[in-house]
Amino acid sequence: MSHPMNRSGHDHTEPRTGHQTHGQGMPVTGGASGTRSTVEDPLHAATQSALGEHPGSGVDHADHRGGSAPAGHTGHGGHGGHGMGHGGGDHVAMFRRLFWLMLVLAVPTVLLSGMFADIIGYPLPDAPGLAWVSPVLGTVIYIWGGRPFLTGAIGEIRSRKPGMMLLIGMAITVAFVASWGSTVGLLSHELDFWWELALLIVIMLLGHWLEMRSLAQTSSALDSLAALLPDGAEKVVGDDLVTVSPAELAVGDVVIVRPGGRVPADGEVVDGTADVDESMITGESKPVRRGVGDTVVAGTVATDTAIRVRVAAVGEDTALAGIQRLVAEAQSSTTRAQLLADRAAGWLFWFAVAAAAVTAVVWSLYGAPDSALVRVITVLVIACPHALGLAIPLVVSISTERAARGGVLVKDRGAMERMRTVGTVLFDKTGTLTKGEPAVDHIAGVGRTEDEVLALAAAAEADSEHPLARAIVAAARQRNLPVPPATEFRASAAVGVTATVDRQTVAVGGPNLLTEHGLAPLPDAQPWAEDGATVLHVLVDGRVAGALALADEIRPESRQAVDALHALGVDVVMITGDAEPVARAVAAELGIDQVFAGVRPEHKAEKVAALQRQGRAVAFTGDGVNDAPALAQADVGIAIGAGTDVAIASAGIILASSDPRAVVSVIRLSRAGYRKMQQNLWAGAGYNLIAVPLAAGVLAPIGFVLPMEVGALLMSLSTVVVASNAQLLRRLDLRPEASVAEVTSGRAAPARGAAAAEPAAAGRR
């Protein structure tokens, strides 16, 4: 079924077209070149602070200008993030290099340590100066390998936001000072921790390396978007072709895009026709035919033939750049769950300090000061709020990237977070559930076949620019009908069109045309009109030859979207300016639960508020043209069919395609992301609740004491587990058809009433 389009004669309203961080820098000298790079506490390593000075760190990134980087998370309990934007690969390499270098130094440090030799039971060779090998190498490991943690600790002290780096810095510094005290005879020889210190730092570096390698994959959203641009573009200069970089293109330049090549800049096709793969921008799985006059977007691929494109936008003005900005803003925005995790990570620092103090007192009271020091170091290391702090940023980064690749642009992370709680989706009908364009739905003839009636109507309407005329001509073309030429074309807004076709006078129009000729409508047309269709009669030499019903065509995906939402337990409501019979017919076909009919654009927000007063969390889905108040009123505003227009201010979520099934993808992503956040928060908090008592020696009475190096390994392992769990979001297939199949597979959608229609103030869109 299609949805009706009004026409009185040719009176018609055109259908609408839906067109701060505080990351503390830790300067580290990496590699032989001695180049000074900046790494940060990996607590929020999923994002990178904006280029330039990091607030609170005093570190200037002017040398990195030219790359793109999102703003970092704001206010994360004193923890910044390893910058994983344009420099993420460098940081992974730096930690990998540090790990292997420190491992080489740690081997002789451990093997030549007197304490380690006593534990294992082998004699050390009696050589001059051998006793100083472990202290010297241990000092090198502490200063060189421990530098990322020590500088991070200093940064946290200066910012008065203590956190993970300060805990690690305190632990390795206590071990370092105690070891030197033992070496020079100021403290007991049992406080010689050189081998433990070496292993502790090596294990911490290993954990950071593995973690940052995982985070490099997580933070690839902006890099992958930037990679959509080709390395070069073939610019037409006179009769020649010149290869230039996309950055060198200017508005007005003409470029050639060859088969399989990527469009280097936004522009208009001026020559050729090609099937263009736009999936990386809009999420549309099938290539879209683009010809002369059509717009193409940077990063899309001409799949079959070459086209020439006149550049209309370059650099920061392209749609791809706008999407990159949205992804960066969404990744850097802070949600309520993130704020909770940040507070918990901040509290955990003081919990760790308190636990270390209690541990020191208890073990000292029991007459074991040496063991007390070991326990304190282990508590400080194992209690680092690393996993807890990574729980949310990783999920945010991955889900935002996955959304962007699926044609879902997140302007407001809070909107994405709220989407999981939505119980009602309110669809604006025209342009959302329907195509917003008229189409021929029914044809009836009097003494003529349907094809003959359609061909006559198409001939008469061929010179008209009216949307209904274009729909009639398009229907004739779809049927491959021979349309005879017409002459003496005349149009009347009140009556219709008249033309001479094969020496016959053919007229096409609405009720006024019949009234003018004193004719009655065809009996077949009555049910069409009752269903709300726009009925046009075709007259030949003053006699009725047939009739056509035109309607706003329902998108073939709309029923699937409604069924999938029902399977998710979400009610579906439709709002329209159409009359109640029309609205009821569409609702019945789609299985929609409730309808607001006859609603003027300015009253849509009132209907959203009415649903909210019933205790419902409402997502409003419209094409953003005249829906701004309703989008703003809803708990979640979703602009659908926006293409690459990322400037829709009132929408928290923008769907690049016009497929209503994408709403199902948004709900799935929101719910899956929230589950991952919960799992990561429980893993991070649960790890600390179990590990800290073990590190303090709560099981010492039964003979179990957790070694400090095992504590460091557990701390690093917990962050890797959290990072790996977040990576599982990448398995989520957000293609609209895949989302619907996943939701409805093996389950029948609950039966829903179709037509709790509510008439509203008269008026059409």
Image (cartoon, rainbow, N blue to C red):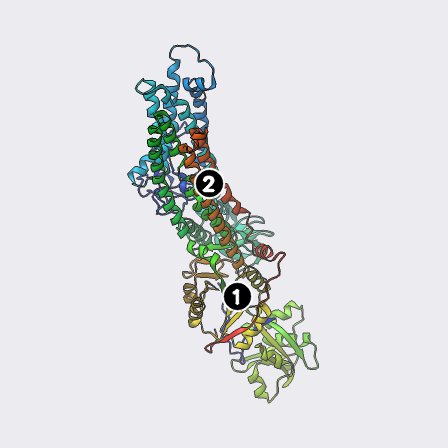
Residue 659 location (% of width, % of height): 54, 60
Residue 97 in view here: no
Front one among 60 and 668: 668
Kind of element beneath mark 2: helix
The three-letter code of the residue at mark 1 reads Val
Mark 1 surroundings: few (<14), some (14-19) or many (≥20) residues within 10 A = many
Residue 699 location (% of width, % of height): 44, 32
Residue 550 in view here: yes
Q: Nearer the viewer, mark 1 or mark 2?
A: 1
The three-letter code of the residue at mark 2 reads Leu
Measured in 3D between alpha carbons, the distance from the residue under mark 1 to the one under mark 2, in whole angstroms, is 38 Å
Q: Give the residue pinned by disc 2.
A: 215
Q: Quadrant of residue 549?
A: bottom right
Q: Quadrant of residue 144?
A: top left
Quarter of the figure with the N terminus: bottom right
- Whether label 1 touches label 2, CB < 8 Å: no
Task: Return the mark for residue 572.
Answer: 1
Kind of element beneath mark 1: strand
Mark 2 surroundings: few (<14), some (14-19) or many (≥20) residues within 10 A = many
Task: Return the mark for residue 535.
Answer: none
Compared with residue 612, is residue 180 higher up or lower down, i.e. above or below? above
Sequence-earlier tag: 1 or 2: 2
Query: In percent of the image, x 29 and y 41: which residue is there?
Result: 160
Residue 540 location (% of width, % of height): 64, 83
Compared with residue 56, is residue 263 higher up or lower down, i.e. above or below? below
Residue 273 location (% of width, % of height): 58, 57
Front one among 497 and 68: 68
Compared with residue 200, is residue 735 higher up or lower down, i.e. above or below? below
